[in-house]
Amino acid sequence: MSLHDIAEYRAKRATFINEDRALRRDYARSANRSAVELEADKIIREIRAIEASSIWDREHENIQHPFPGMEFLTGMDISLV
């Protein structure tokens, strides 16, 4: 693969992602968010990133493939870590 191929792939990927996002219900509203909403979004994203690295990326003895959104009773042991 050449650098040109990679750049072309990334451009097409970005276009595809933007087109997909435009189809979402909350897309029109997201462009007009208030400063408070933007700050809340930032905080939630930071919490999810911490959770992803501290819980979901770890190996757990009785759970083969932990993932966000798994059933509460199945994932209950993870939350006690």
Image (spheres, grey):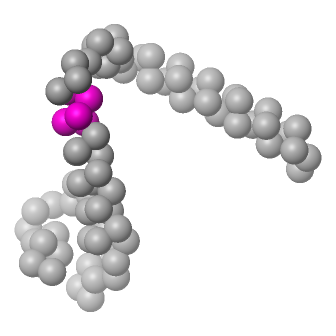
Question: Does the magenta portion include 40?
Answer: yes
Q: Is residue 68 above or below residue 45?
A: below
Residue 77 lies, in percent from the top left, at 12, 78
Q: Is residue 64 magenta?
A: no
* Image location (x, y in percent) of residue 21: 44, 23
> How many numbered marks does the figure carry?
0
Q: Which residues are magenta?
A: 37-41
Determine whether 55 is above or below 16 in the image: below
**View extreme (front): residue:** 35
In the picture, residue 59 is in which quadrant?
A: bottom left
Q: Position of residue 71 (x, y in %)?
A: 15, 60
Q: Is residue 66 visible?
A: no
The vertical placement of 19 against 43, above or below, is: above
Residue pushed farthest bottom? 61
Q: Is residue 17 visible?
A: yes
Quick check: 6 left or right of 60? right
* Residue 35 located left or right of residue 28: left
Q: On the rendered structure, is 61 left or right of 21? A: left
- Residue that appears at 22% across and 45% down: 44
Front in this rendered view, residue 14 or 33: 33
Residue at 31 percent of width and 19 percent of height: 30
Dominant SS type (magenta): helix
Work out whether 22 lies above or below 67: above
Residue 24 screen position, x and y as percent? 36, 20
Q: Who's the residue at 34% across and 11% down the image?
A: 28
Q: Residue at x 23, y 23 (%)?
A: 35
Quadrant housing the C terminus: bottom left
Residue situated in front as seen by the camera: 8 or 76: 8
